[in-house]
Image: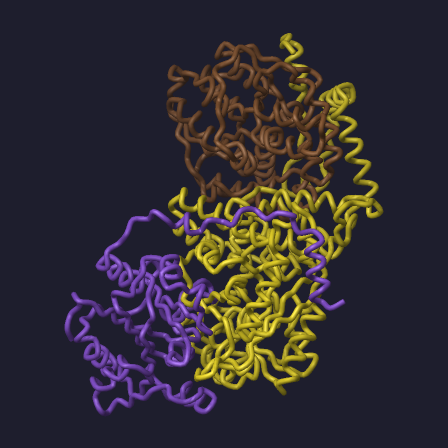
Amino acid sequence: MSARASMLSKLRACAPATAPDMPDVAGYYAGRPASTQAERVERLRAELTASHADVHVVSHAGWAGAVAQLLHAQGVRRLVRQSGAPGDSLARALPPALQASEFGRPLDEWKAELFEQVDAGFTVADCAIAATGTLVHLCGPHMPRTLSLVPPLHVVLIDAERIYATLFEAADGERWAARMPSNLVMLSGPSKTADIQQTLAYGAHGPARLCVFIACEQGEAA
Amino acid sequence: MSKHPMQFVPTADFKERARGALDDDKLRKSFRGAMDFLQAKRRNQFSDEHERESLRDLGSAIRKYALARLPDLLEELESKLTRNGIQVHWAENAEEANAIVLDIMRRNQARRMIKGKSMASEEIELNHYLAEHGMECIESDMGEYIVQLAGEKPSHIVMPAIHKNKADVAKLFEENIPDTPYTEDVDELIQTGRRALRRHFMEADVGLSGVNFAVAETGTLWLIENEGNGRLSTTVPPVHVAIMGMEKVVAKLEHVVPLVSLLTRSATGQAVTTYFNLISSPRRSGELDGPREVHLVLLDNGRSQAYADEQLRSTLQCIRCGACMNHCPVYGRIGGHAYGTTYPGPIGKILSPHLLGLDEAGDLPFASTLCGACSEVCPVRIPIPDLLIRLRNEAKRNPNETVATPLRGQGAKHSAAERVVWQFWSGAFKSPKAWKALRWGATRLRAFTPGAQAGWTQHRTPLKPASRSLHDMLKDRDQPE
Amino acid sequence: MQARNYPPKPKDVYLFGTCLIDLFVPQAGMDAVRLLEREGLTVHFPQDQSCCGQPAYTSGDAEAARKVARAQMKLFAQDWPVIVPSGSCAGMMREHWPKLFADDAAYGPQATALAERVFELSEFLVHVLQPDYSAARAEPVKVALHTSCSARREMGTRVHGLSLLASLPGVEVVEHVRESECCGFGGTFSLRHPDISGAIVRDKVDSIAGTGCQRFITADCGCMLNISTAAQHRSVAVAGTHMASFVCERLTGESA
């Protein structure tokens, strides 16, 4: 008998005849007070800041300039950006000395380059979760998995309209269960560890710095 | 990295190792500090008692539901993962799981593996097995990397190097990583670890990880971490192999939502960890990175024994947060290595008898005061003290007795002498006459109370009966019956 | 632990004295009787009682525990509350007897019914008798409180102990470091794993001594004997007093 058949038959032999009712997760999270966008922006900002991220609330017109300013101030010489319209807008706002390219090629062809020469990665989060200060990335053809992971500085743009209050609302509202990407990543701050004597240190293996730009109507122009 | 990992240590030496740990002041200080830190962090996360208790109810119900449907969910998971392009393997024991991983490596002409944190891989001694077959295996979780450099095993399931202080790590890095001066600056130490491991992520042929939750509905592996090494291990190498105990499947994606909240808050007192990494497929056409092959190894390794018994099945509700050990007065005193098992602390005491047999688990089910701190904090309400009592009964049962769901190693602690003691004890206490005679003897002969009382007087003055028993005193005042 | 409904004040109660009190701390049993009688109750003490069976139960000999428990059950035939001056023994009778006899058609229902009327002493005083201790001695005293782990978790004994002490004038309860942590007794654990048990109780003694109180109050004789004899072994001036004896002492200035 195969291991599969043997394991399943052992379990079937003693599994209960009837399962309890399906737990009501939606019911548990139902009835929570609704929040306004301003509240969600503020909560996202506060939680991300508490997680050691730099957060900037900016206007739709001004975000690219603000990001460019930050990259310049950080001394970034080489940036890799997610392909698409926001990345193009950013590229136009950058000073010519700052080399900005799209991810462009399969990782295998330039792995060492990405690991060793790229200072910063720019991505647009698909949505965010205010309660925990979390940015959601649906990785796929236009969102490489490593762009938010390998460069030491990660810059993220998030549209204030795309902020959910909680993880449950995001999963439910975005219908993740019906359309899972190959890799869905939620990130809530720069990489960190407390593995040495419970002392918190940032930049363990992923980005040491996370800069978040929340674009909204009320945001400041650059 | 030349050192071999620590070999499986026999649990028979538990008492001796515990004694060694109790005598090690530095070790006890490390654990006390860590316990106080983790307990306070958890407490801060659960300040709303009603929210905490209702969330624990929900978490427990979700895990019970998944276990009740375990064989169905495993088949559904397999079918969804396969549809998504992830290859599923089944392993009844450690040997099979190791062979599966080795085979995947060989088929890919792989030599180098980078590992994210995986307790299941510790359980099957994967590093040791692969090393014996000429493969290089590097742990990339900072804590795991530290214990691997030290030639040790994790002493905690969430914080593997909890037994080491920064001076230990400083010395270890200085001795093992080229061009590393001694420093106790934790930021510098972490940057040293980061630099040392970076090349391995780039060059590894295979990345291995554990799994926190597997979602049957979508065919998704949900991984939780703070460092990013888990994401790197599952993203950069061309092949990703995940390994998980088969009980970790849940029915619906939404079922993970309360479970992750319980897990991160109970484990390290964080509302959320830095990364939730939800893997549902290898690199798809048009994608620029991600592994080209993803495998999942489903491991039984004794779990089906716990599953077979309705009461013991609740052992498998565990989501591996480690809160039970963080609050355990025994674990806090002796640390994780004393147990000699992959999973230490309260969860280890109830899980190891299934993974290893009651005989190998030895004294572990008995090494608890049954204080219940573990079940009080357990996010999925596993009744750990009740399970310990049950395992004690099974360990003491006559090895030849036939029972409905026999446990491996039944009767390992069966002792004719101890049976006699308890028979004498129950004889004395069930018979009013015998108990009366005993009381009479104990109170009248109290002057002859021995000064040395087995175990008790090592740390305490002798117990001496009163000159008159409560029975006598109440009889004297004609207390009604 | 589930919230429970408390009966109105009865005329009669049973006392289950427990084996440890019986042999080692009988005065605590006498003081419990006195506190119950002070509220006008008739206290019945069936002379055939012995032990709740907890030592065998927790050691993994369920059969031996059942034998002893069965012998106790028939002693409390009237529908009166059974008062136990020990939280862990009360917990054994209330929480574990029903489990122990779950598959027993004869004793199962009896165990479940009896469990419903088992009360730990301070719980019964606080919730049912609500005694007036306002005339008790008033000079200030500081004490630490230790609650058995199973008693706290199964019977809510810590809360009851605190309210009982709060009803006594002049008594200040000083919290010690890691008060909720186990004292390391664990019944036969203390004999089977003396080194670990010894290390745990050592810390408990130090933490009580650290408050500056030389005295701790507890509703559990197992813990009390463990902590007190461990302190004595190291010549640390920390000693335990049973809750019932302490209340009596405050009421009259002397034990019964």
Q: How is the image coloured?
A: by chain
Residue C168, image quadrant: top left
- Location of the C terminus of chain C by quadrant is top right
Residue A159, image quadrant: bottom left
Q: In the visual, does C62 lie left or right of A69?
A: right
Task: Specify the colour of chain C.
Answer: brown
> Farthest left residue?
A221
Could you say where residue B156 lies in the image, as x and y percent from the top left? 56, 60
Question: What residue is at 49 percent from the left and 41 percent from the top?
Answer: C180
Task: Specify the colour of chain A.
Answer: purple
Question: What residue is at 62 percent from the left and 25 percent from the top?
Answer: C21
- Does A215 sit above or below residue C167? below
Residue situated in front as seen by the camera: B462 or A56: A56
Could you say where residue A181 lies in the image, as x and y percent from the top left? 44, 72
Q: In the visual, does B446 lie left or right of B161?
A: right
Question: What residue is at 43 percent from the left and 90 percent from the top?
Answer: A110
Task: Specify the colour of chain B.
Answer: yellow
Residue situated in front as seen by the camera: B103 or B373: B103
Residue A106 in sight here: yes
Could you say where residue C135 lies in the image, as x and y percent from the top left? 38, 15
> Farthest top residue?
B478
Could you say where residue C193 lies in the image, as x and y percent from the top left? 67, 46
Residue situated in front as seen by the camera: B358 or B100: B100
- Does B77 sit above or below residue C31? below
Question: What residue is at 71 percent from the left and 28 percent from the top?
Answer: C105
